[in-house]
Structures are given as C-alpha cells and as structure tokens.
Image: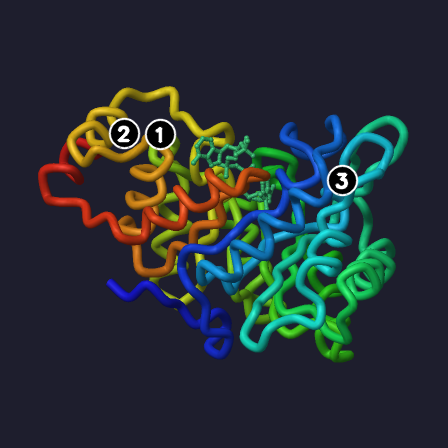
Amino acid sequence: MSNRFRLGGDLDVNRLGFGAMRLPSKDGMGGPARNPENGRAVLRRAVALGVDHIDTAEFYFSAGGTVRANTLIREALHPYPAGLTIATKVGPVLGPDGISHGTAADLRGQVEANLESLGLDRLDLVYLRIGLMEPPHGESLAERFEALAALREEGLIRHLGVSNIDAAHLAEARAIAPVTAVQNQFHAARRGDADILAACEESGIAFVPFFPVGGGGEFEDARPAKVAARHGVTVPQIGLAWLLASSPVTLAIPGTGSVSHLEENMAAAAITLTEEDLADLA
Ligand SMILES: NC(=O)c1ccc[n+]([C@@H]2O[C@H](COP(=O)([O-])OP(=O)(O)OC[C@H]3O[C@@H](n4cnc5c(N)ncnc54)[C@H](OP(=O)(O)O)[C@@H]3O)[C@@H](O)[C@H]2O)c1
C-alpha cells in the first residue's frame, strides 16, 4: 500500500501527517496552555521528519486564547515549505458558554480568520464540522456546505471536506460540491463508519480519522497491546500502523505536543503488520 495519497487528486501527502489540536493544550480546546516554544519545535521537527499534511482549526487554543494552533503553525513554518498541505475546519463557534454550531452566515468570517492567522491567500482543505464528537443524525448540512462551496468558487478554498458526519450527510454534501476528505472519530478500538469508509474508497475520498491513537495515547482494548508487545513497539504505534493498513484512503493525523511522542508516531510508518497481527487486531 502506498504511503502517500493525493488529496483531491492534486495535493500529494504523506499518509502519516500531524494533528495540531494538542499543541496549545494537552486537553485540546480551552485547556491549560502548553509552552509555545515547545509547540513550534514540535512543528519544525514534524516537517523535518516528513510531515506534509497538518490538520488544524482556528478554534484550537488554550484557556483564554493565549496559545493558538494556527499562530504556532505560522510562527514555526511560514513561509511554508513547498508541498505542505494545511487542512482546517469551520463550523463551530466558541463563546463564553462553550462550543455551539455556527450558521452558514458565520462561515465566511471563519474562513477569513483562518486565512489571516495562517498567513495564506487560499486554504488547501477546509472541513465543515457539523457535530461535536458524533454526527447530528437527521440534521441537514446543505445550507452550510453550499455557503462553503461558494467560498471555494471564489478562490478562498482549494478543497472541501466534512467532519462528524454520517453517510447521509456525505451524500448530501457530494450532491452540492466535490468532497475531498472526511474526518470522523475512528481508531483501532472504535471502528464504526464502515459505510463511510466504503464510500470514500469507492470515490478516492480521504478518510482522516480523529483520535487516531485513541485520543490519549491508549486504547480501552487489549488487542493493540498484544501486537505491540510482539513487535517491541508502543501501543500508539500499533494504532497508527493499523490505521494506515486498514485502507489505502486512510490518513493518520496523530496529535501531540511532545517531540518524543512525535518521533515515536512517525516511526510507526516503518511497522509492517503481519496477517497474524491483523487477525489479532480484528
Ligand atoms: N474533527 C473533529 O471533530 C476533531 C476532534 C478531535 C481532534 N481532531 C483532529 O485530530 C487530531 C488527532 O486527534 P487528537 O490529537 O485529539 O487525538 P490522538 O492523536 O488520538 O491522541 C492525542 C493524545 O495522545 C497523546 N499521544 C500522542 N502520541 C502519543 C504517544 N506516542 N505516546 C503516548 N501518548 C501519545 C497526546 O499527548 P501528548 O501531547 O502529551 O503527546 C494526546 O493527549 C487532532 O490533533 C485534531 O487535529 C478533530
């Protein structure tokens, strides 16, 4: 299986990328701030190790907004190396009462905020994120996706994705504009979305799961630990190797604020799972 994938048919990326949510705070959105210099060092090391696909969002920031993922990315990597793909997400609105869902009218401002903070004229890939952790079944995304597609027509976005969606949402979006990538929760110990993965494989859409190492570097499942022991590697590494082996359209975006975890995660690309391993993980 190739270790590279063409996002949208033209953005050639390493299937093992990087998720930026943990750079401002280990807890993800709104948690205690991490050291920004360390975050910039993680980003530079990621690119040095071959990461050319970074997943981020304007709403990835620490408590009080003191450390922000997009700012770290710009400070560490701008002017961006040729071939670096930065994917971001729009939809959620973070207010004093927490996170809520924006409307179609919010999307232009959110896209412009990403362009500004990342220092770009056009965003490579923008996901419309419509759910929090789970898809909002039965809720239409049409009005919001049409608004995002119009921003793409304007030239502000190269490719569109959808996140926290079900198969009906994917079909609804694809009837409006081409969908390049889907981002849903999926990992070695949580394997729903077979219908979505099949649709992605059939159409060359990237499936880019969040929580690729279980959301915390461990899985509530003994199977990856057994295979990790056999290979003499760590459980997160087996989680990533499994994800990459599970389909040619899956891209991994493990998140970390630690250089040593980053190095460990990138080394997972060299792990070849055997038939026995895959059977044990099945
Ligand atoms: N679309 C959505 O709704 C959505 C939701 C969540 C996330 N995302 C995206 O998906 C990316 C990946 O998800 P995620 O970061 O939440 O989850 P993840 O990659 O599964 O796990 C990250 C967590 O695991 C730890 N970790 C990472 N590598 C490790 C290793 N080798 N050993 C031990 N612990 C390790 C990290 O801690 P340390 O930082 O201390 O290493 C962090 O707490 C995010 O960064 C974000 O870009 C999208």
Name which residue type carries label 2.
Answer: Pro
Q: Report the residue at 50% width, 61% height from top.
A: 48
Determine which quarter of the picture holds residue 274: top left
Name which residue type carries label 3.
Answer: Phe
Name which residue type carries label 1.
Answer: Ala
Q: Secondary structure at mark 2?
A: helix
Disc nearest the viewer among 3 and 1: 3
Of callouts 1 and 2, which one flags the residue occurring earlier in the amino acid sequence? 1
Q: Is residue 66 above or below residue 15?
A: above
Q: Residues within 10 Å of mark 3 (few under 14, many from 20)?
A: many
Q: Nearer the viewer, residue 32 or 110?
A: 32
Mark count: 3
Residue under label 2: 224
Q: Secondary structure at mark 3?
A: loop
Residue at the far left in the pictured view: 276
Does the closest atom of ligand 1 sit within 8 Å of the Cβ of label 1? Answer: no
Please provide percent x and percent y for residue 152: 71, 73
Residue under label 3: 61
Which of the labelled discs sits on residue 189, or is there none? 1
Determine which quarter of the picture holds residue 101: top right
Q: Report the residue at 28% width, 66% height from top.
A: 2
